[in-house]
Image (cartoon, helix red, strand yellow):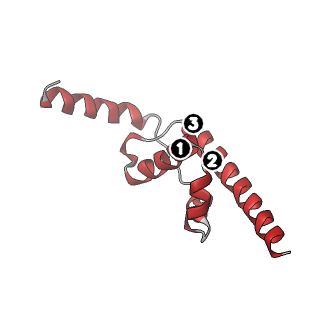
Amino acid sequence: MTPEELEKYTRRCRELAQGYHYDYSNSELEELVKSPSWNEIQKQLTPSAKKAYKSYFRYIADRSFGCLDVEIKTWELLVEGIKAIQVKMLKASKKAKK
């Protein structure tokens, strides 16, 4: 693909994405990432969860292509999974203290 074709393709993709553009943000996910236990949580994420996490922050960094409903659902499921890991870690730390 020539540089001109690539530019035309990219411009067309952005035009199409405007019809599907969401100004979506998941503040809950962003807060979870800032939590003190994030490093330990991240180690326990599955490869697909890590991929979803990275895709969210790529989207936040460059919203020019928008996101799809399926991506939003994936990010919401990711938050649920992270919360489950947090609960498991909390229970384990309480057992260790006993």
Residue beneath the point at 63% across and 47% down: 78
Q: Are marks 2 and 1 in contact (CB under 8 Å)?
A: yes
Residue beneath the point at 39% across and 54% down: 61
Which is closer to the viewer, label 3 or label 1? Answer: 1
Residue closer to the observer: 3 or 42: 42
Could you tell me how far apart the alpha carbons at marks 3 and 1 are, in whole angstroms? 13 Å
The residue carrying pointer 1 sits among few (fewer than 14), some (14 to 19) or many (20 or more) residues within 10 Å by Cα, namely some
Q: Secondary structure at mark 1?
A: helix
Identify the residue position indicated by label 2 in the image.
78
The residue carrying pointer 2 sits among few (fewer than 14), some (14 to 19) or many (20 or more) residues within 10 Å by Cα, namely some
In the drawing, what numbered circle is on residue 52?
1
User: Against 9, is 47 above or below?
Assistant: below
Q: Position of residue 57 (x, y in %)?
A: 46, 52
Which three-letter amino acid code belongs to the residue tagged 3?
Asp
Q: Earlier in the sequence, mark 2 or mark 1?
A: 1
User: Against 43, is 9 above or below?
Assistant: above
Residue beneath the point at 60% across and 69% down: 35
Which three-letter amino acid code belongs to the residue tagged 2?
Leu
Q: Secondary structure at mark 3?
A: helix
Image quadrant in which the C terminus is located: bottom right
Q: Position of residue 12 (x, y in %)?
A: 29, 29
Could you tell me how far apart the alpha carbons at marks 2 and 1 are, in whole angstroms? 7 Å
Identify the residue position indicated by label 3 in the image.
69
Residue beneath the point at 68% across and 49% down: 81
Residue 34 appears left or right of 66: right
